[in-house]
Image (tube, rainbow, N blue to C red):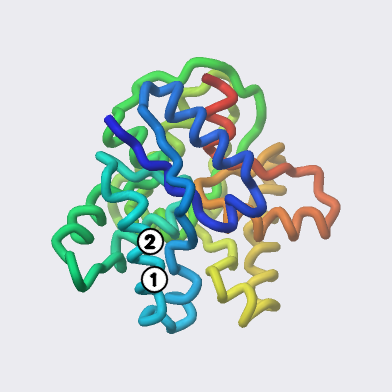
Amino acid sequence: MKIGLFIPCYVDQFYPKVAIATYELLQKLGCDVRFPIKQTCCGQPMANSGYEHLTKGCDTNFIANFSEFDYIVCPSGSCVLHVKEHLHDENNEALASQMRKRVFELTEFITDILKIEMIPGNFPHKVGMHQSCHGQRGLKLSQMTELNAPFFSKPEQLLSKIKGINLVSLSRKDECCGFGGTFCVTEEAISVKMGQDRIKDHEDHQVEYITGGDMSCLMHLEGILKRQKSPIKIIHIAEILNATI
């Protein structure tokens, strides 16, 4: 199983330890992982701002870097969803279509493809799980609370296998953190208030860590936590899983 590690540009620039944790985790789980060195932004920021027609270069580069792999795995639901829905190649659309089906978010890949049943190790901390909107509503990584349907969460399924972890049940499981990509720039005040509300839910449950599958959301929450001088720490789910195995 040949895996191409797709790392979002903001993770590469600001949180390289998340990329390293993802790489190490997939190796520990028996995968042959490669990191295409010439990969760049997938084009999501431009598309979110209404300039999807300018992302052709990003698509061409993505295809050139990842076409050889059996699976493409990324520790970011938003970037995965963008590629799944928007990757195109006017010269070889069949290849682009095939590649869209081979792109997976990290927890989705571990639960659905690798089908990992046991996570060895220990993480003796009180943790709150932030489920990002793209992952939940786009990739269906967890159930939406407004639906009258059984609840499930692929990230929580993995975390619950870890010894010692106290995974709290938040009052509003699927509330948006307010990041929203370029939304946090164009609507800063609303974005910050939404983030403060999301943090309040975790504070009310006295968590030590807030985790999630999208470092972009966690980056937004981390900024607010630091300004509030909160003792709560941010940690990507890949870092927890990698540290315990």
Give whichever of 6, 128 is nearer the camera.
6
Give whichever of 202, 57 is nearer the camera.
57
Q: Amino acid at mark 1?
A: Gly
Q: Which residue sits furthest right?
A: 229
Label 1's element?
helix
Does 71 sit above or below residue 177?
above
Asked if the residue at tag 2 contacts the one at tag 1, i.e. Cβ–Cβ closer than 8 Å, the answer is yes
Q: Amino acid at mark 2?
A: Asn
Q: CA distance from mark 1 to mark 2?
A: 6 Å
* Rendered location of residue 26, percent (x, y): 43, 30
How many numbered discs?
2
Would you name the residue on which mark 2 appears?
A: 61
Which residue is rendered at x = 59% and y = 29% of the image? 166
Which residue is rendered at x = 51% and y = 23% of the image? 162
Which residue is rendered at x = 45% and y = 60% of the image? 133
Q: Answer whether residue 187 is visible to the viewer in this image.
A: yes
Label 2 Cα crowd, 10 Å radius (few <14 / some 14-19 / many 20+) = some
Q: Answer whether residue 153 is visible to the viewer in this image.
A: no
Does 10 sit above or below residue 46?
above
Label 1 Cα crowd, 10 Å radius (few <14 / some 14-19 / many 20+) = few
Give whichever of 17, 2 is nearer the camera.
2
* Rendered location of residue 206, percent (x, y): 71, 41
In the rendered structure, the answer to whether residue 236 lies left or right of residue 87 reads: right
* Rendered location of residue 152, percent (x, y): 35, 42
In the rendered structure, the answer to whether residue 90 lies left or right of residue 66 reads: left
Residue 121's label in the rendered image is none
Residue 57's label in the rendered image is 1
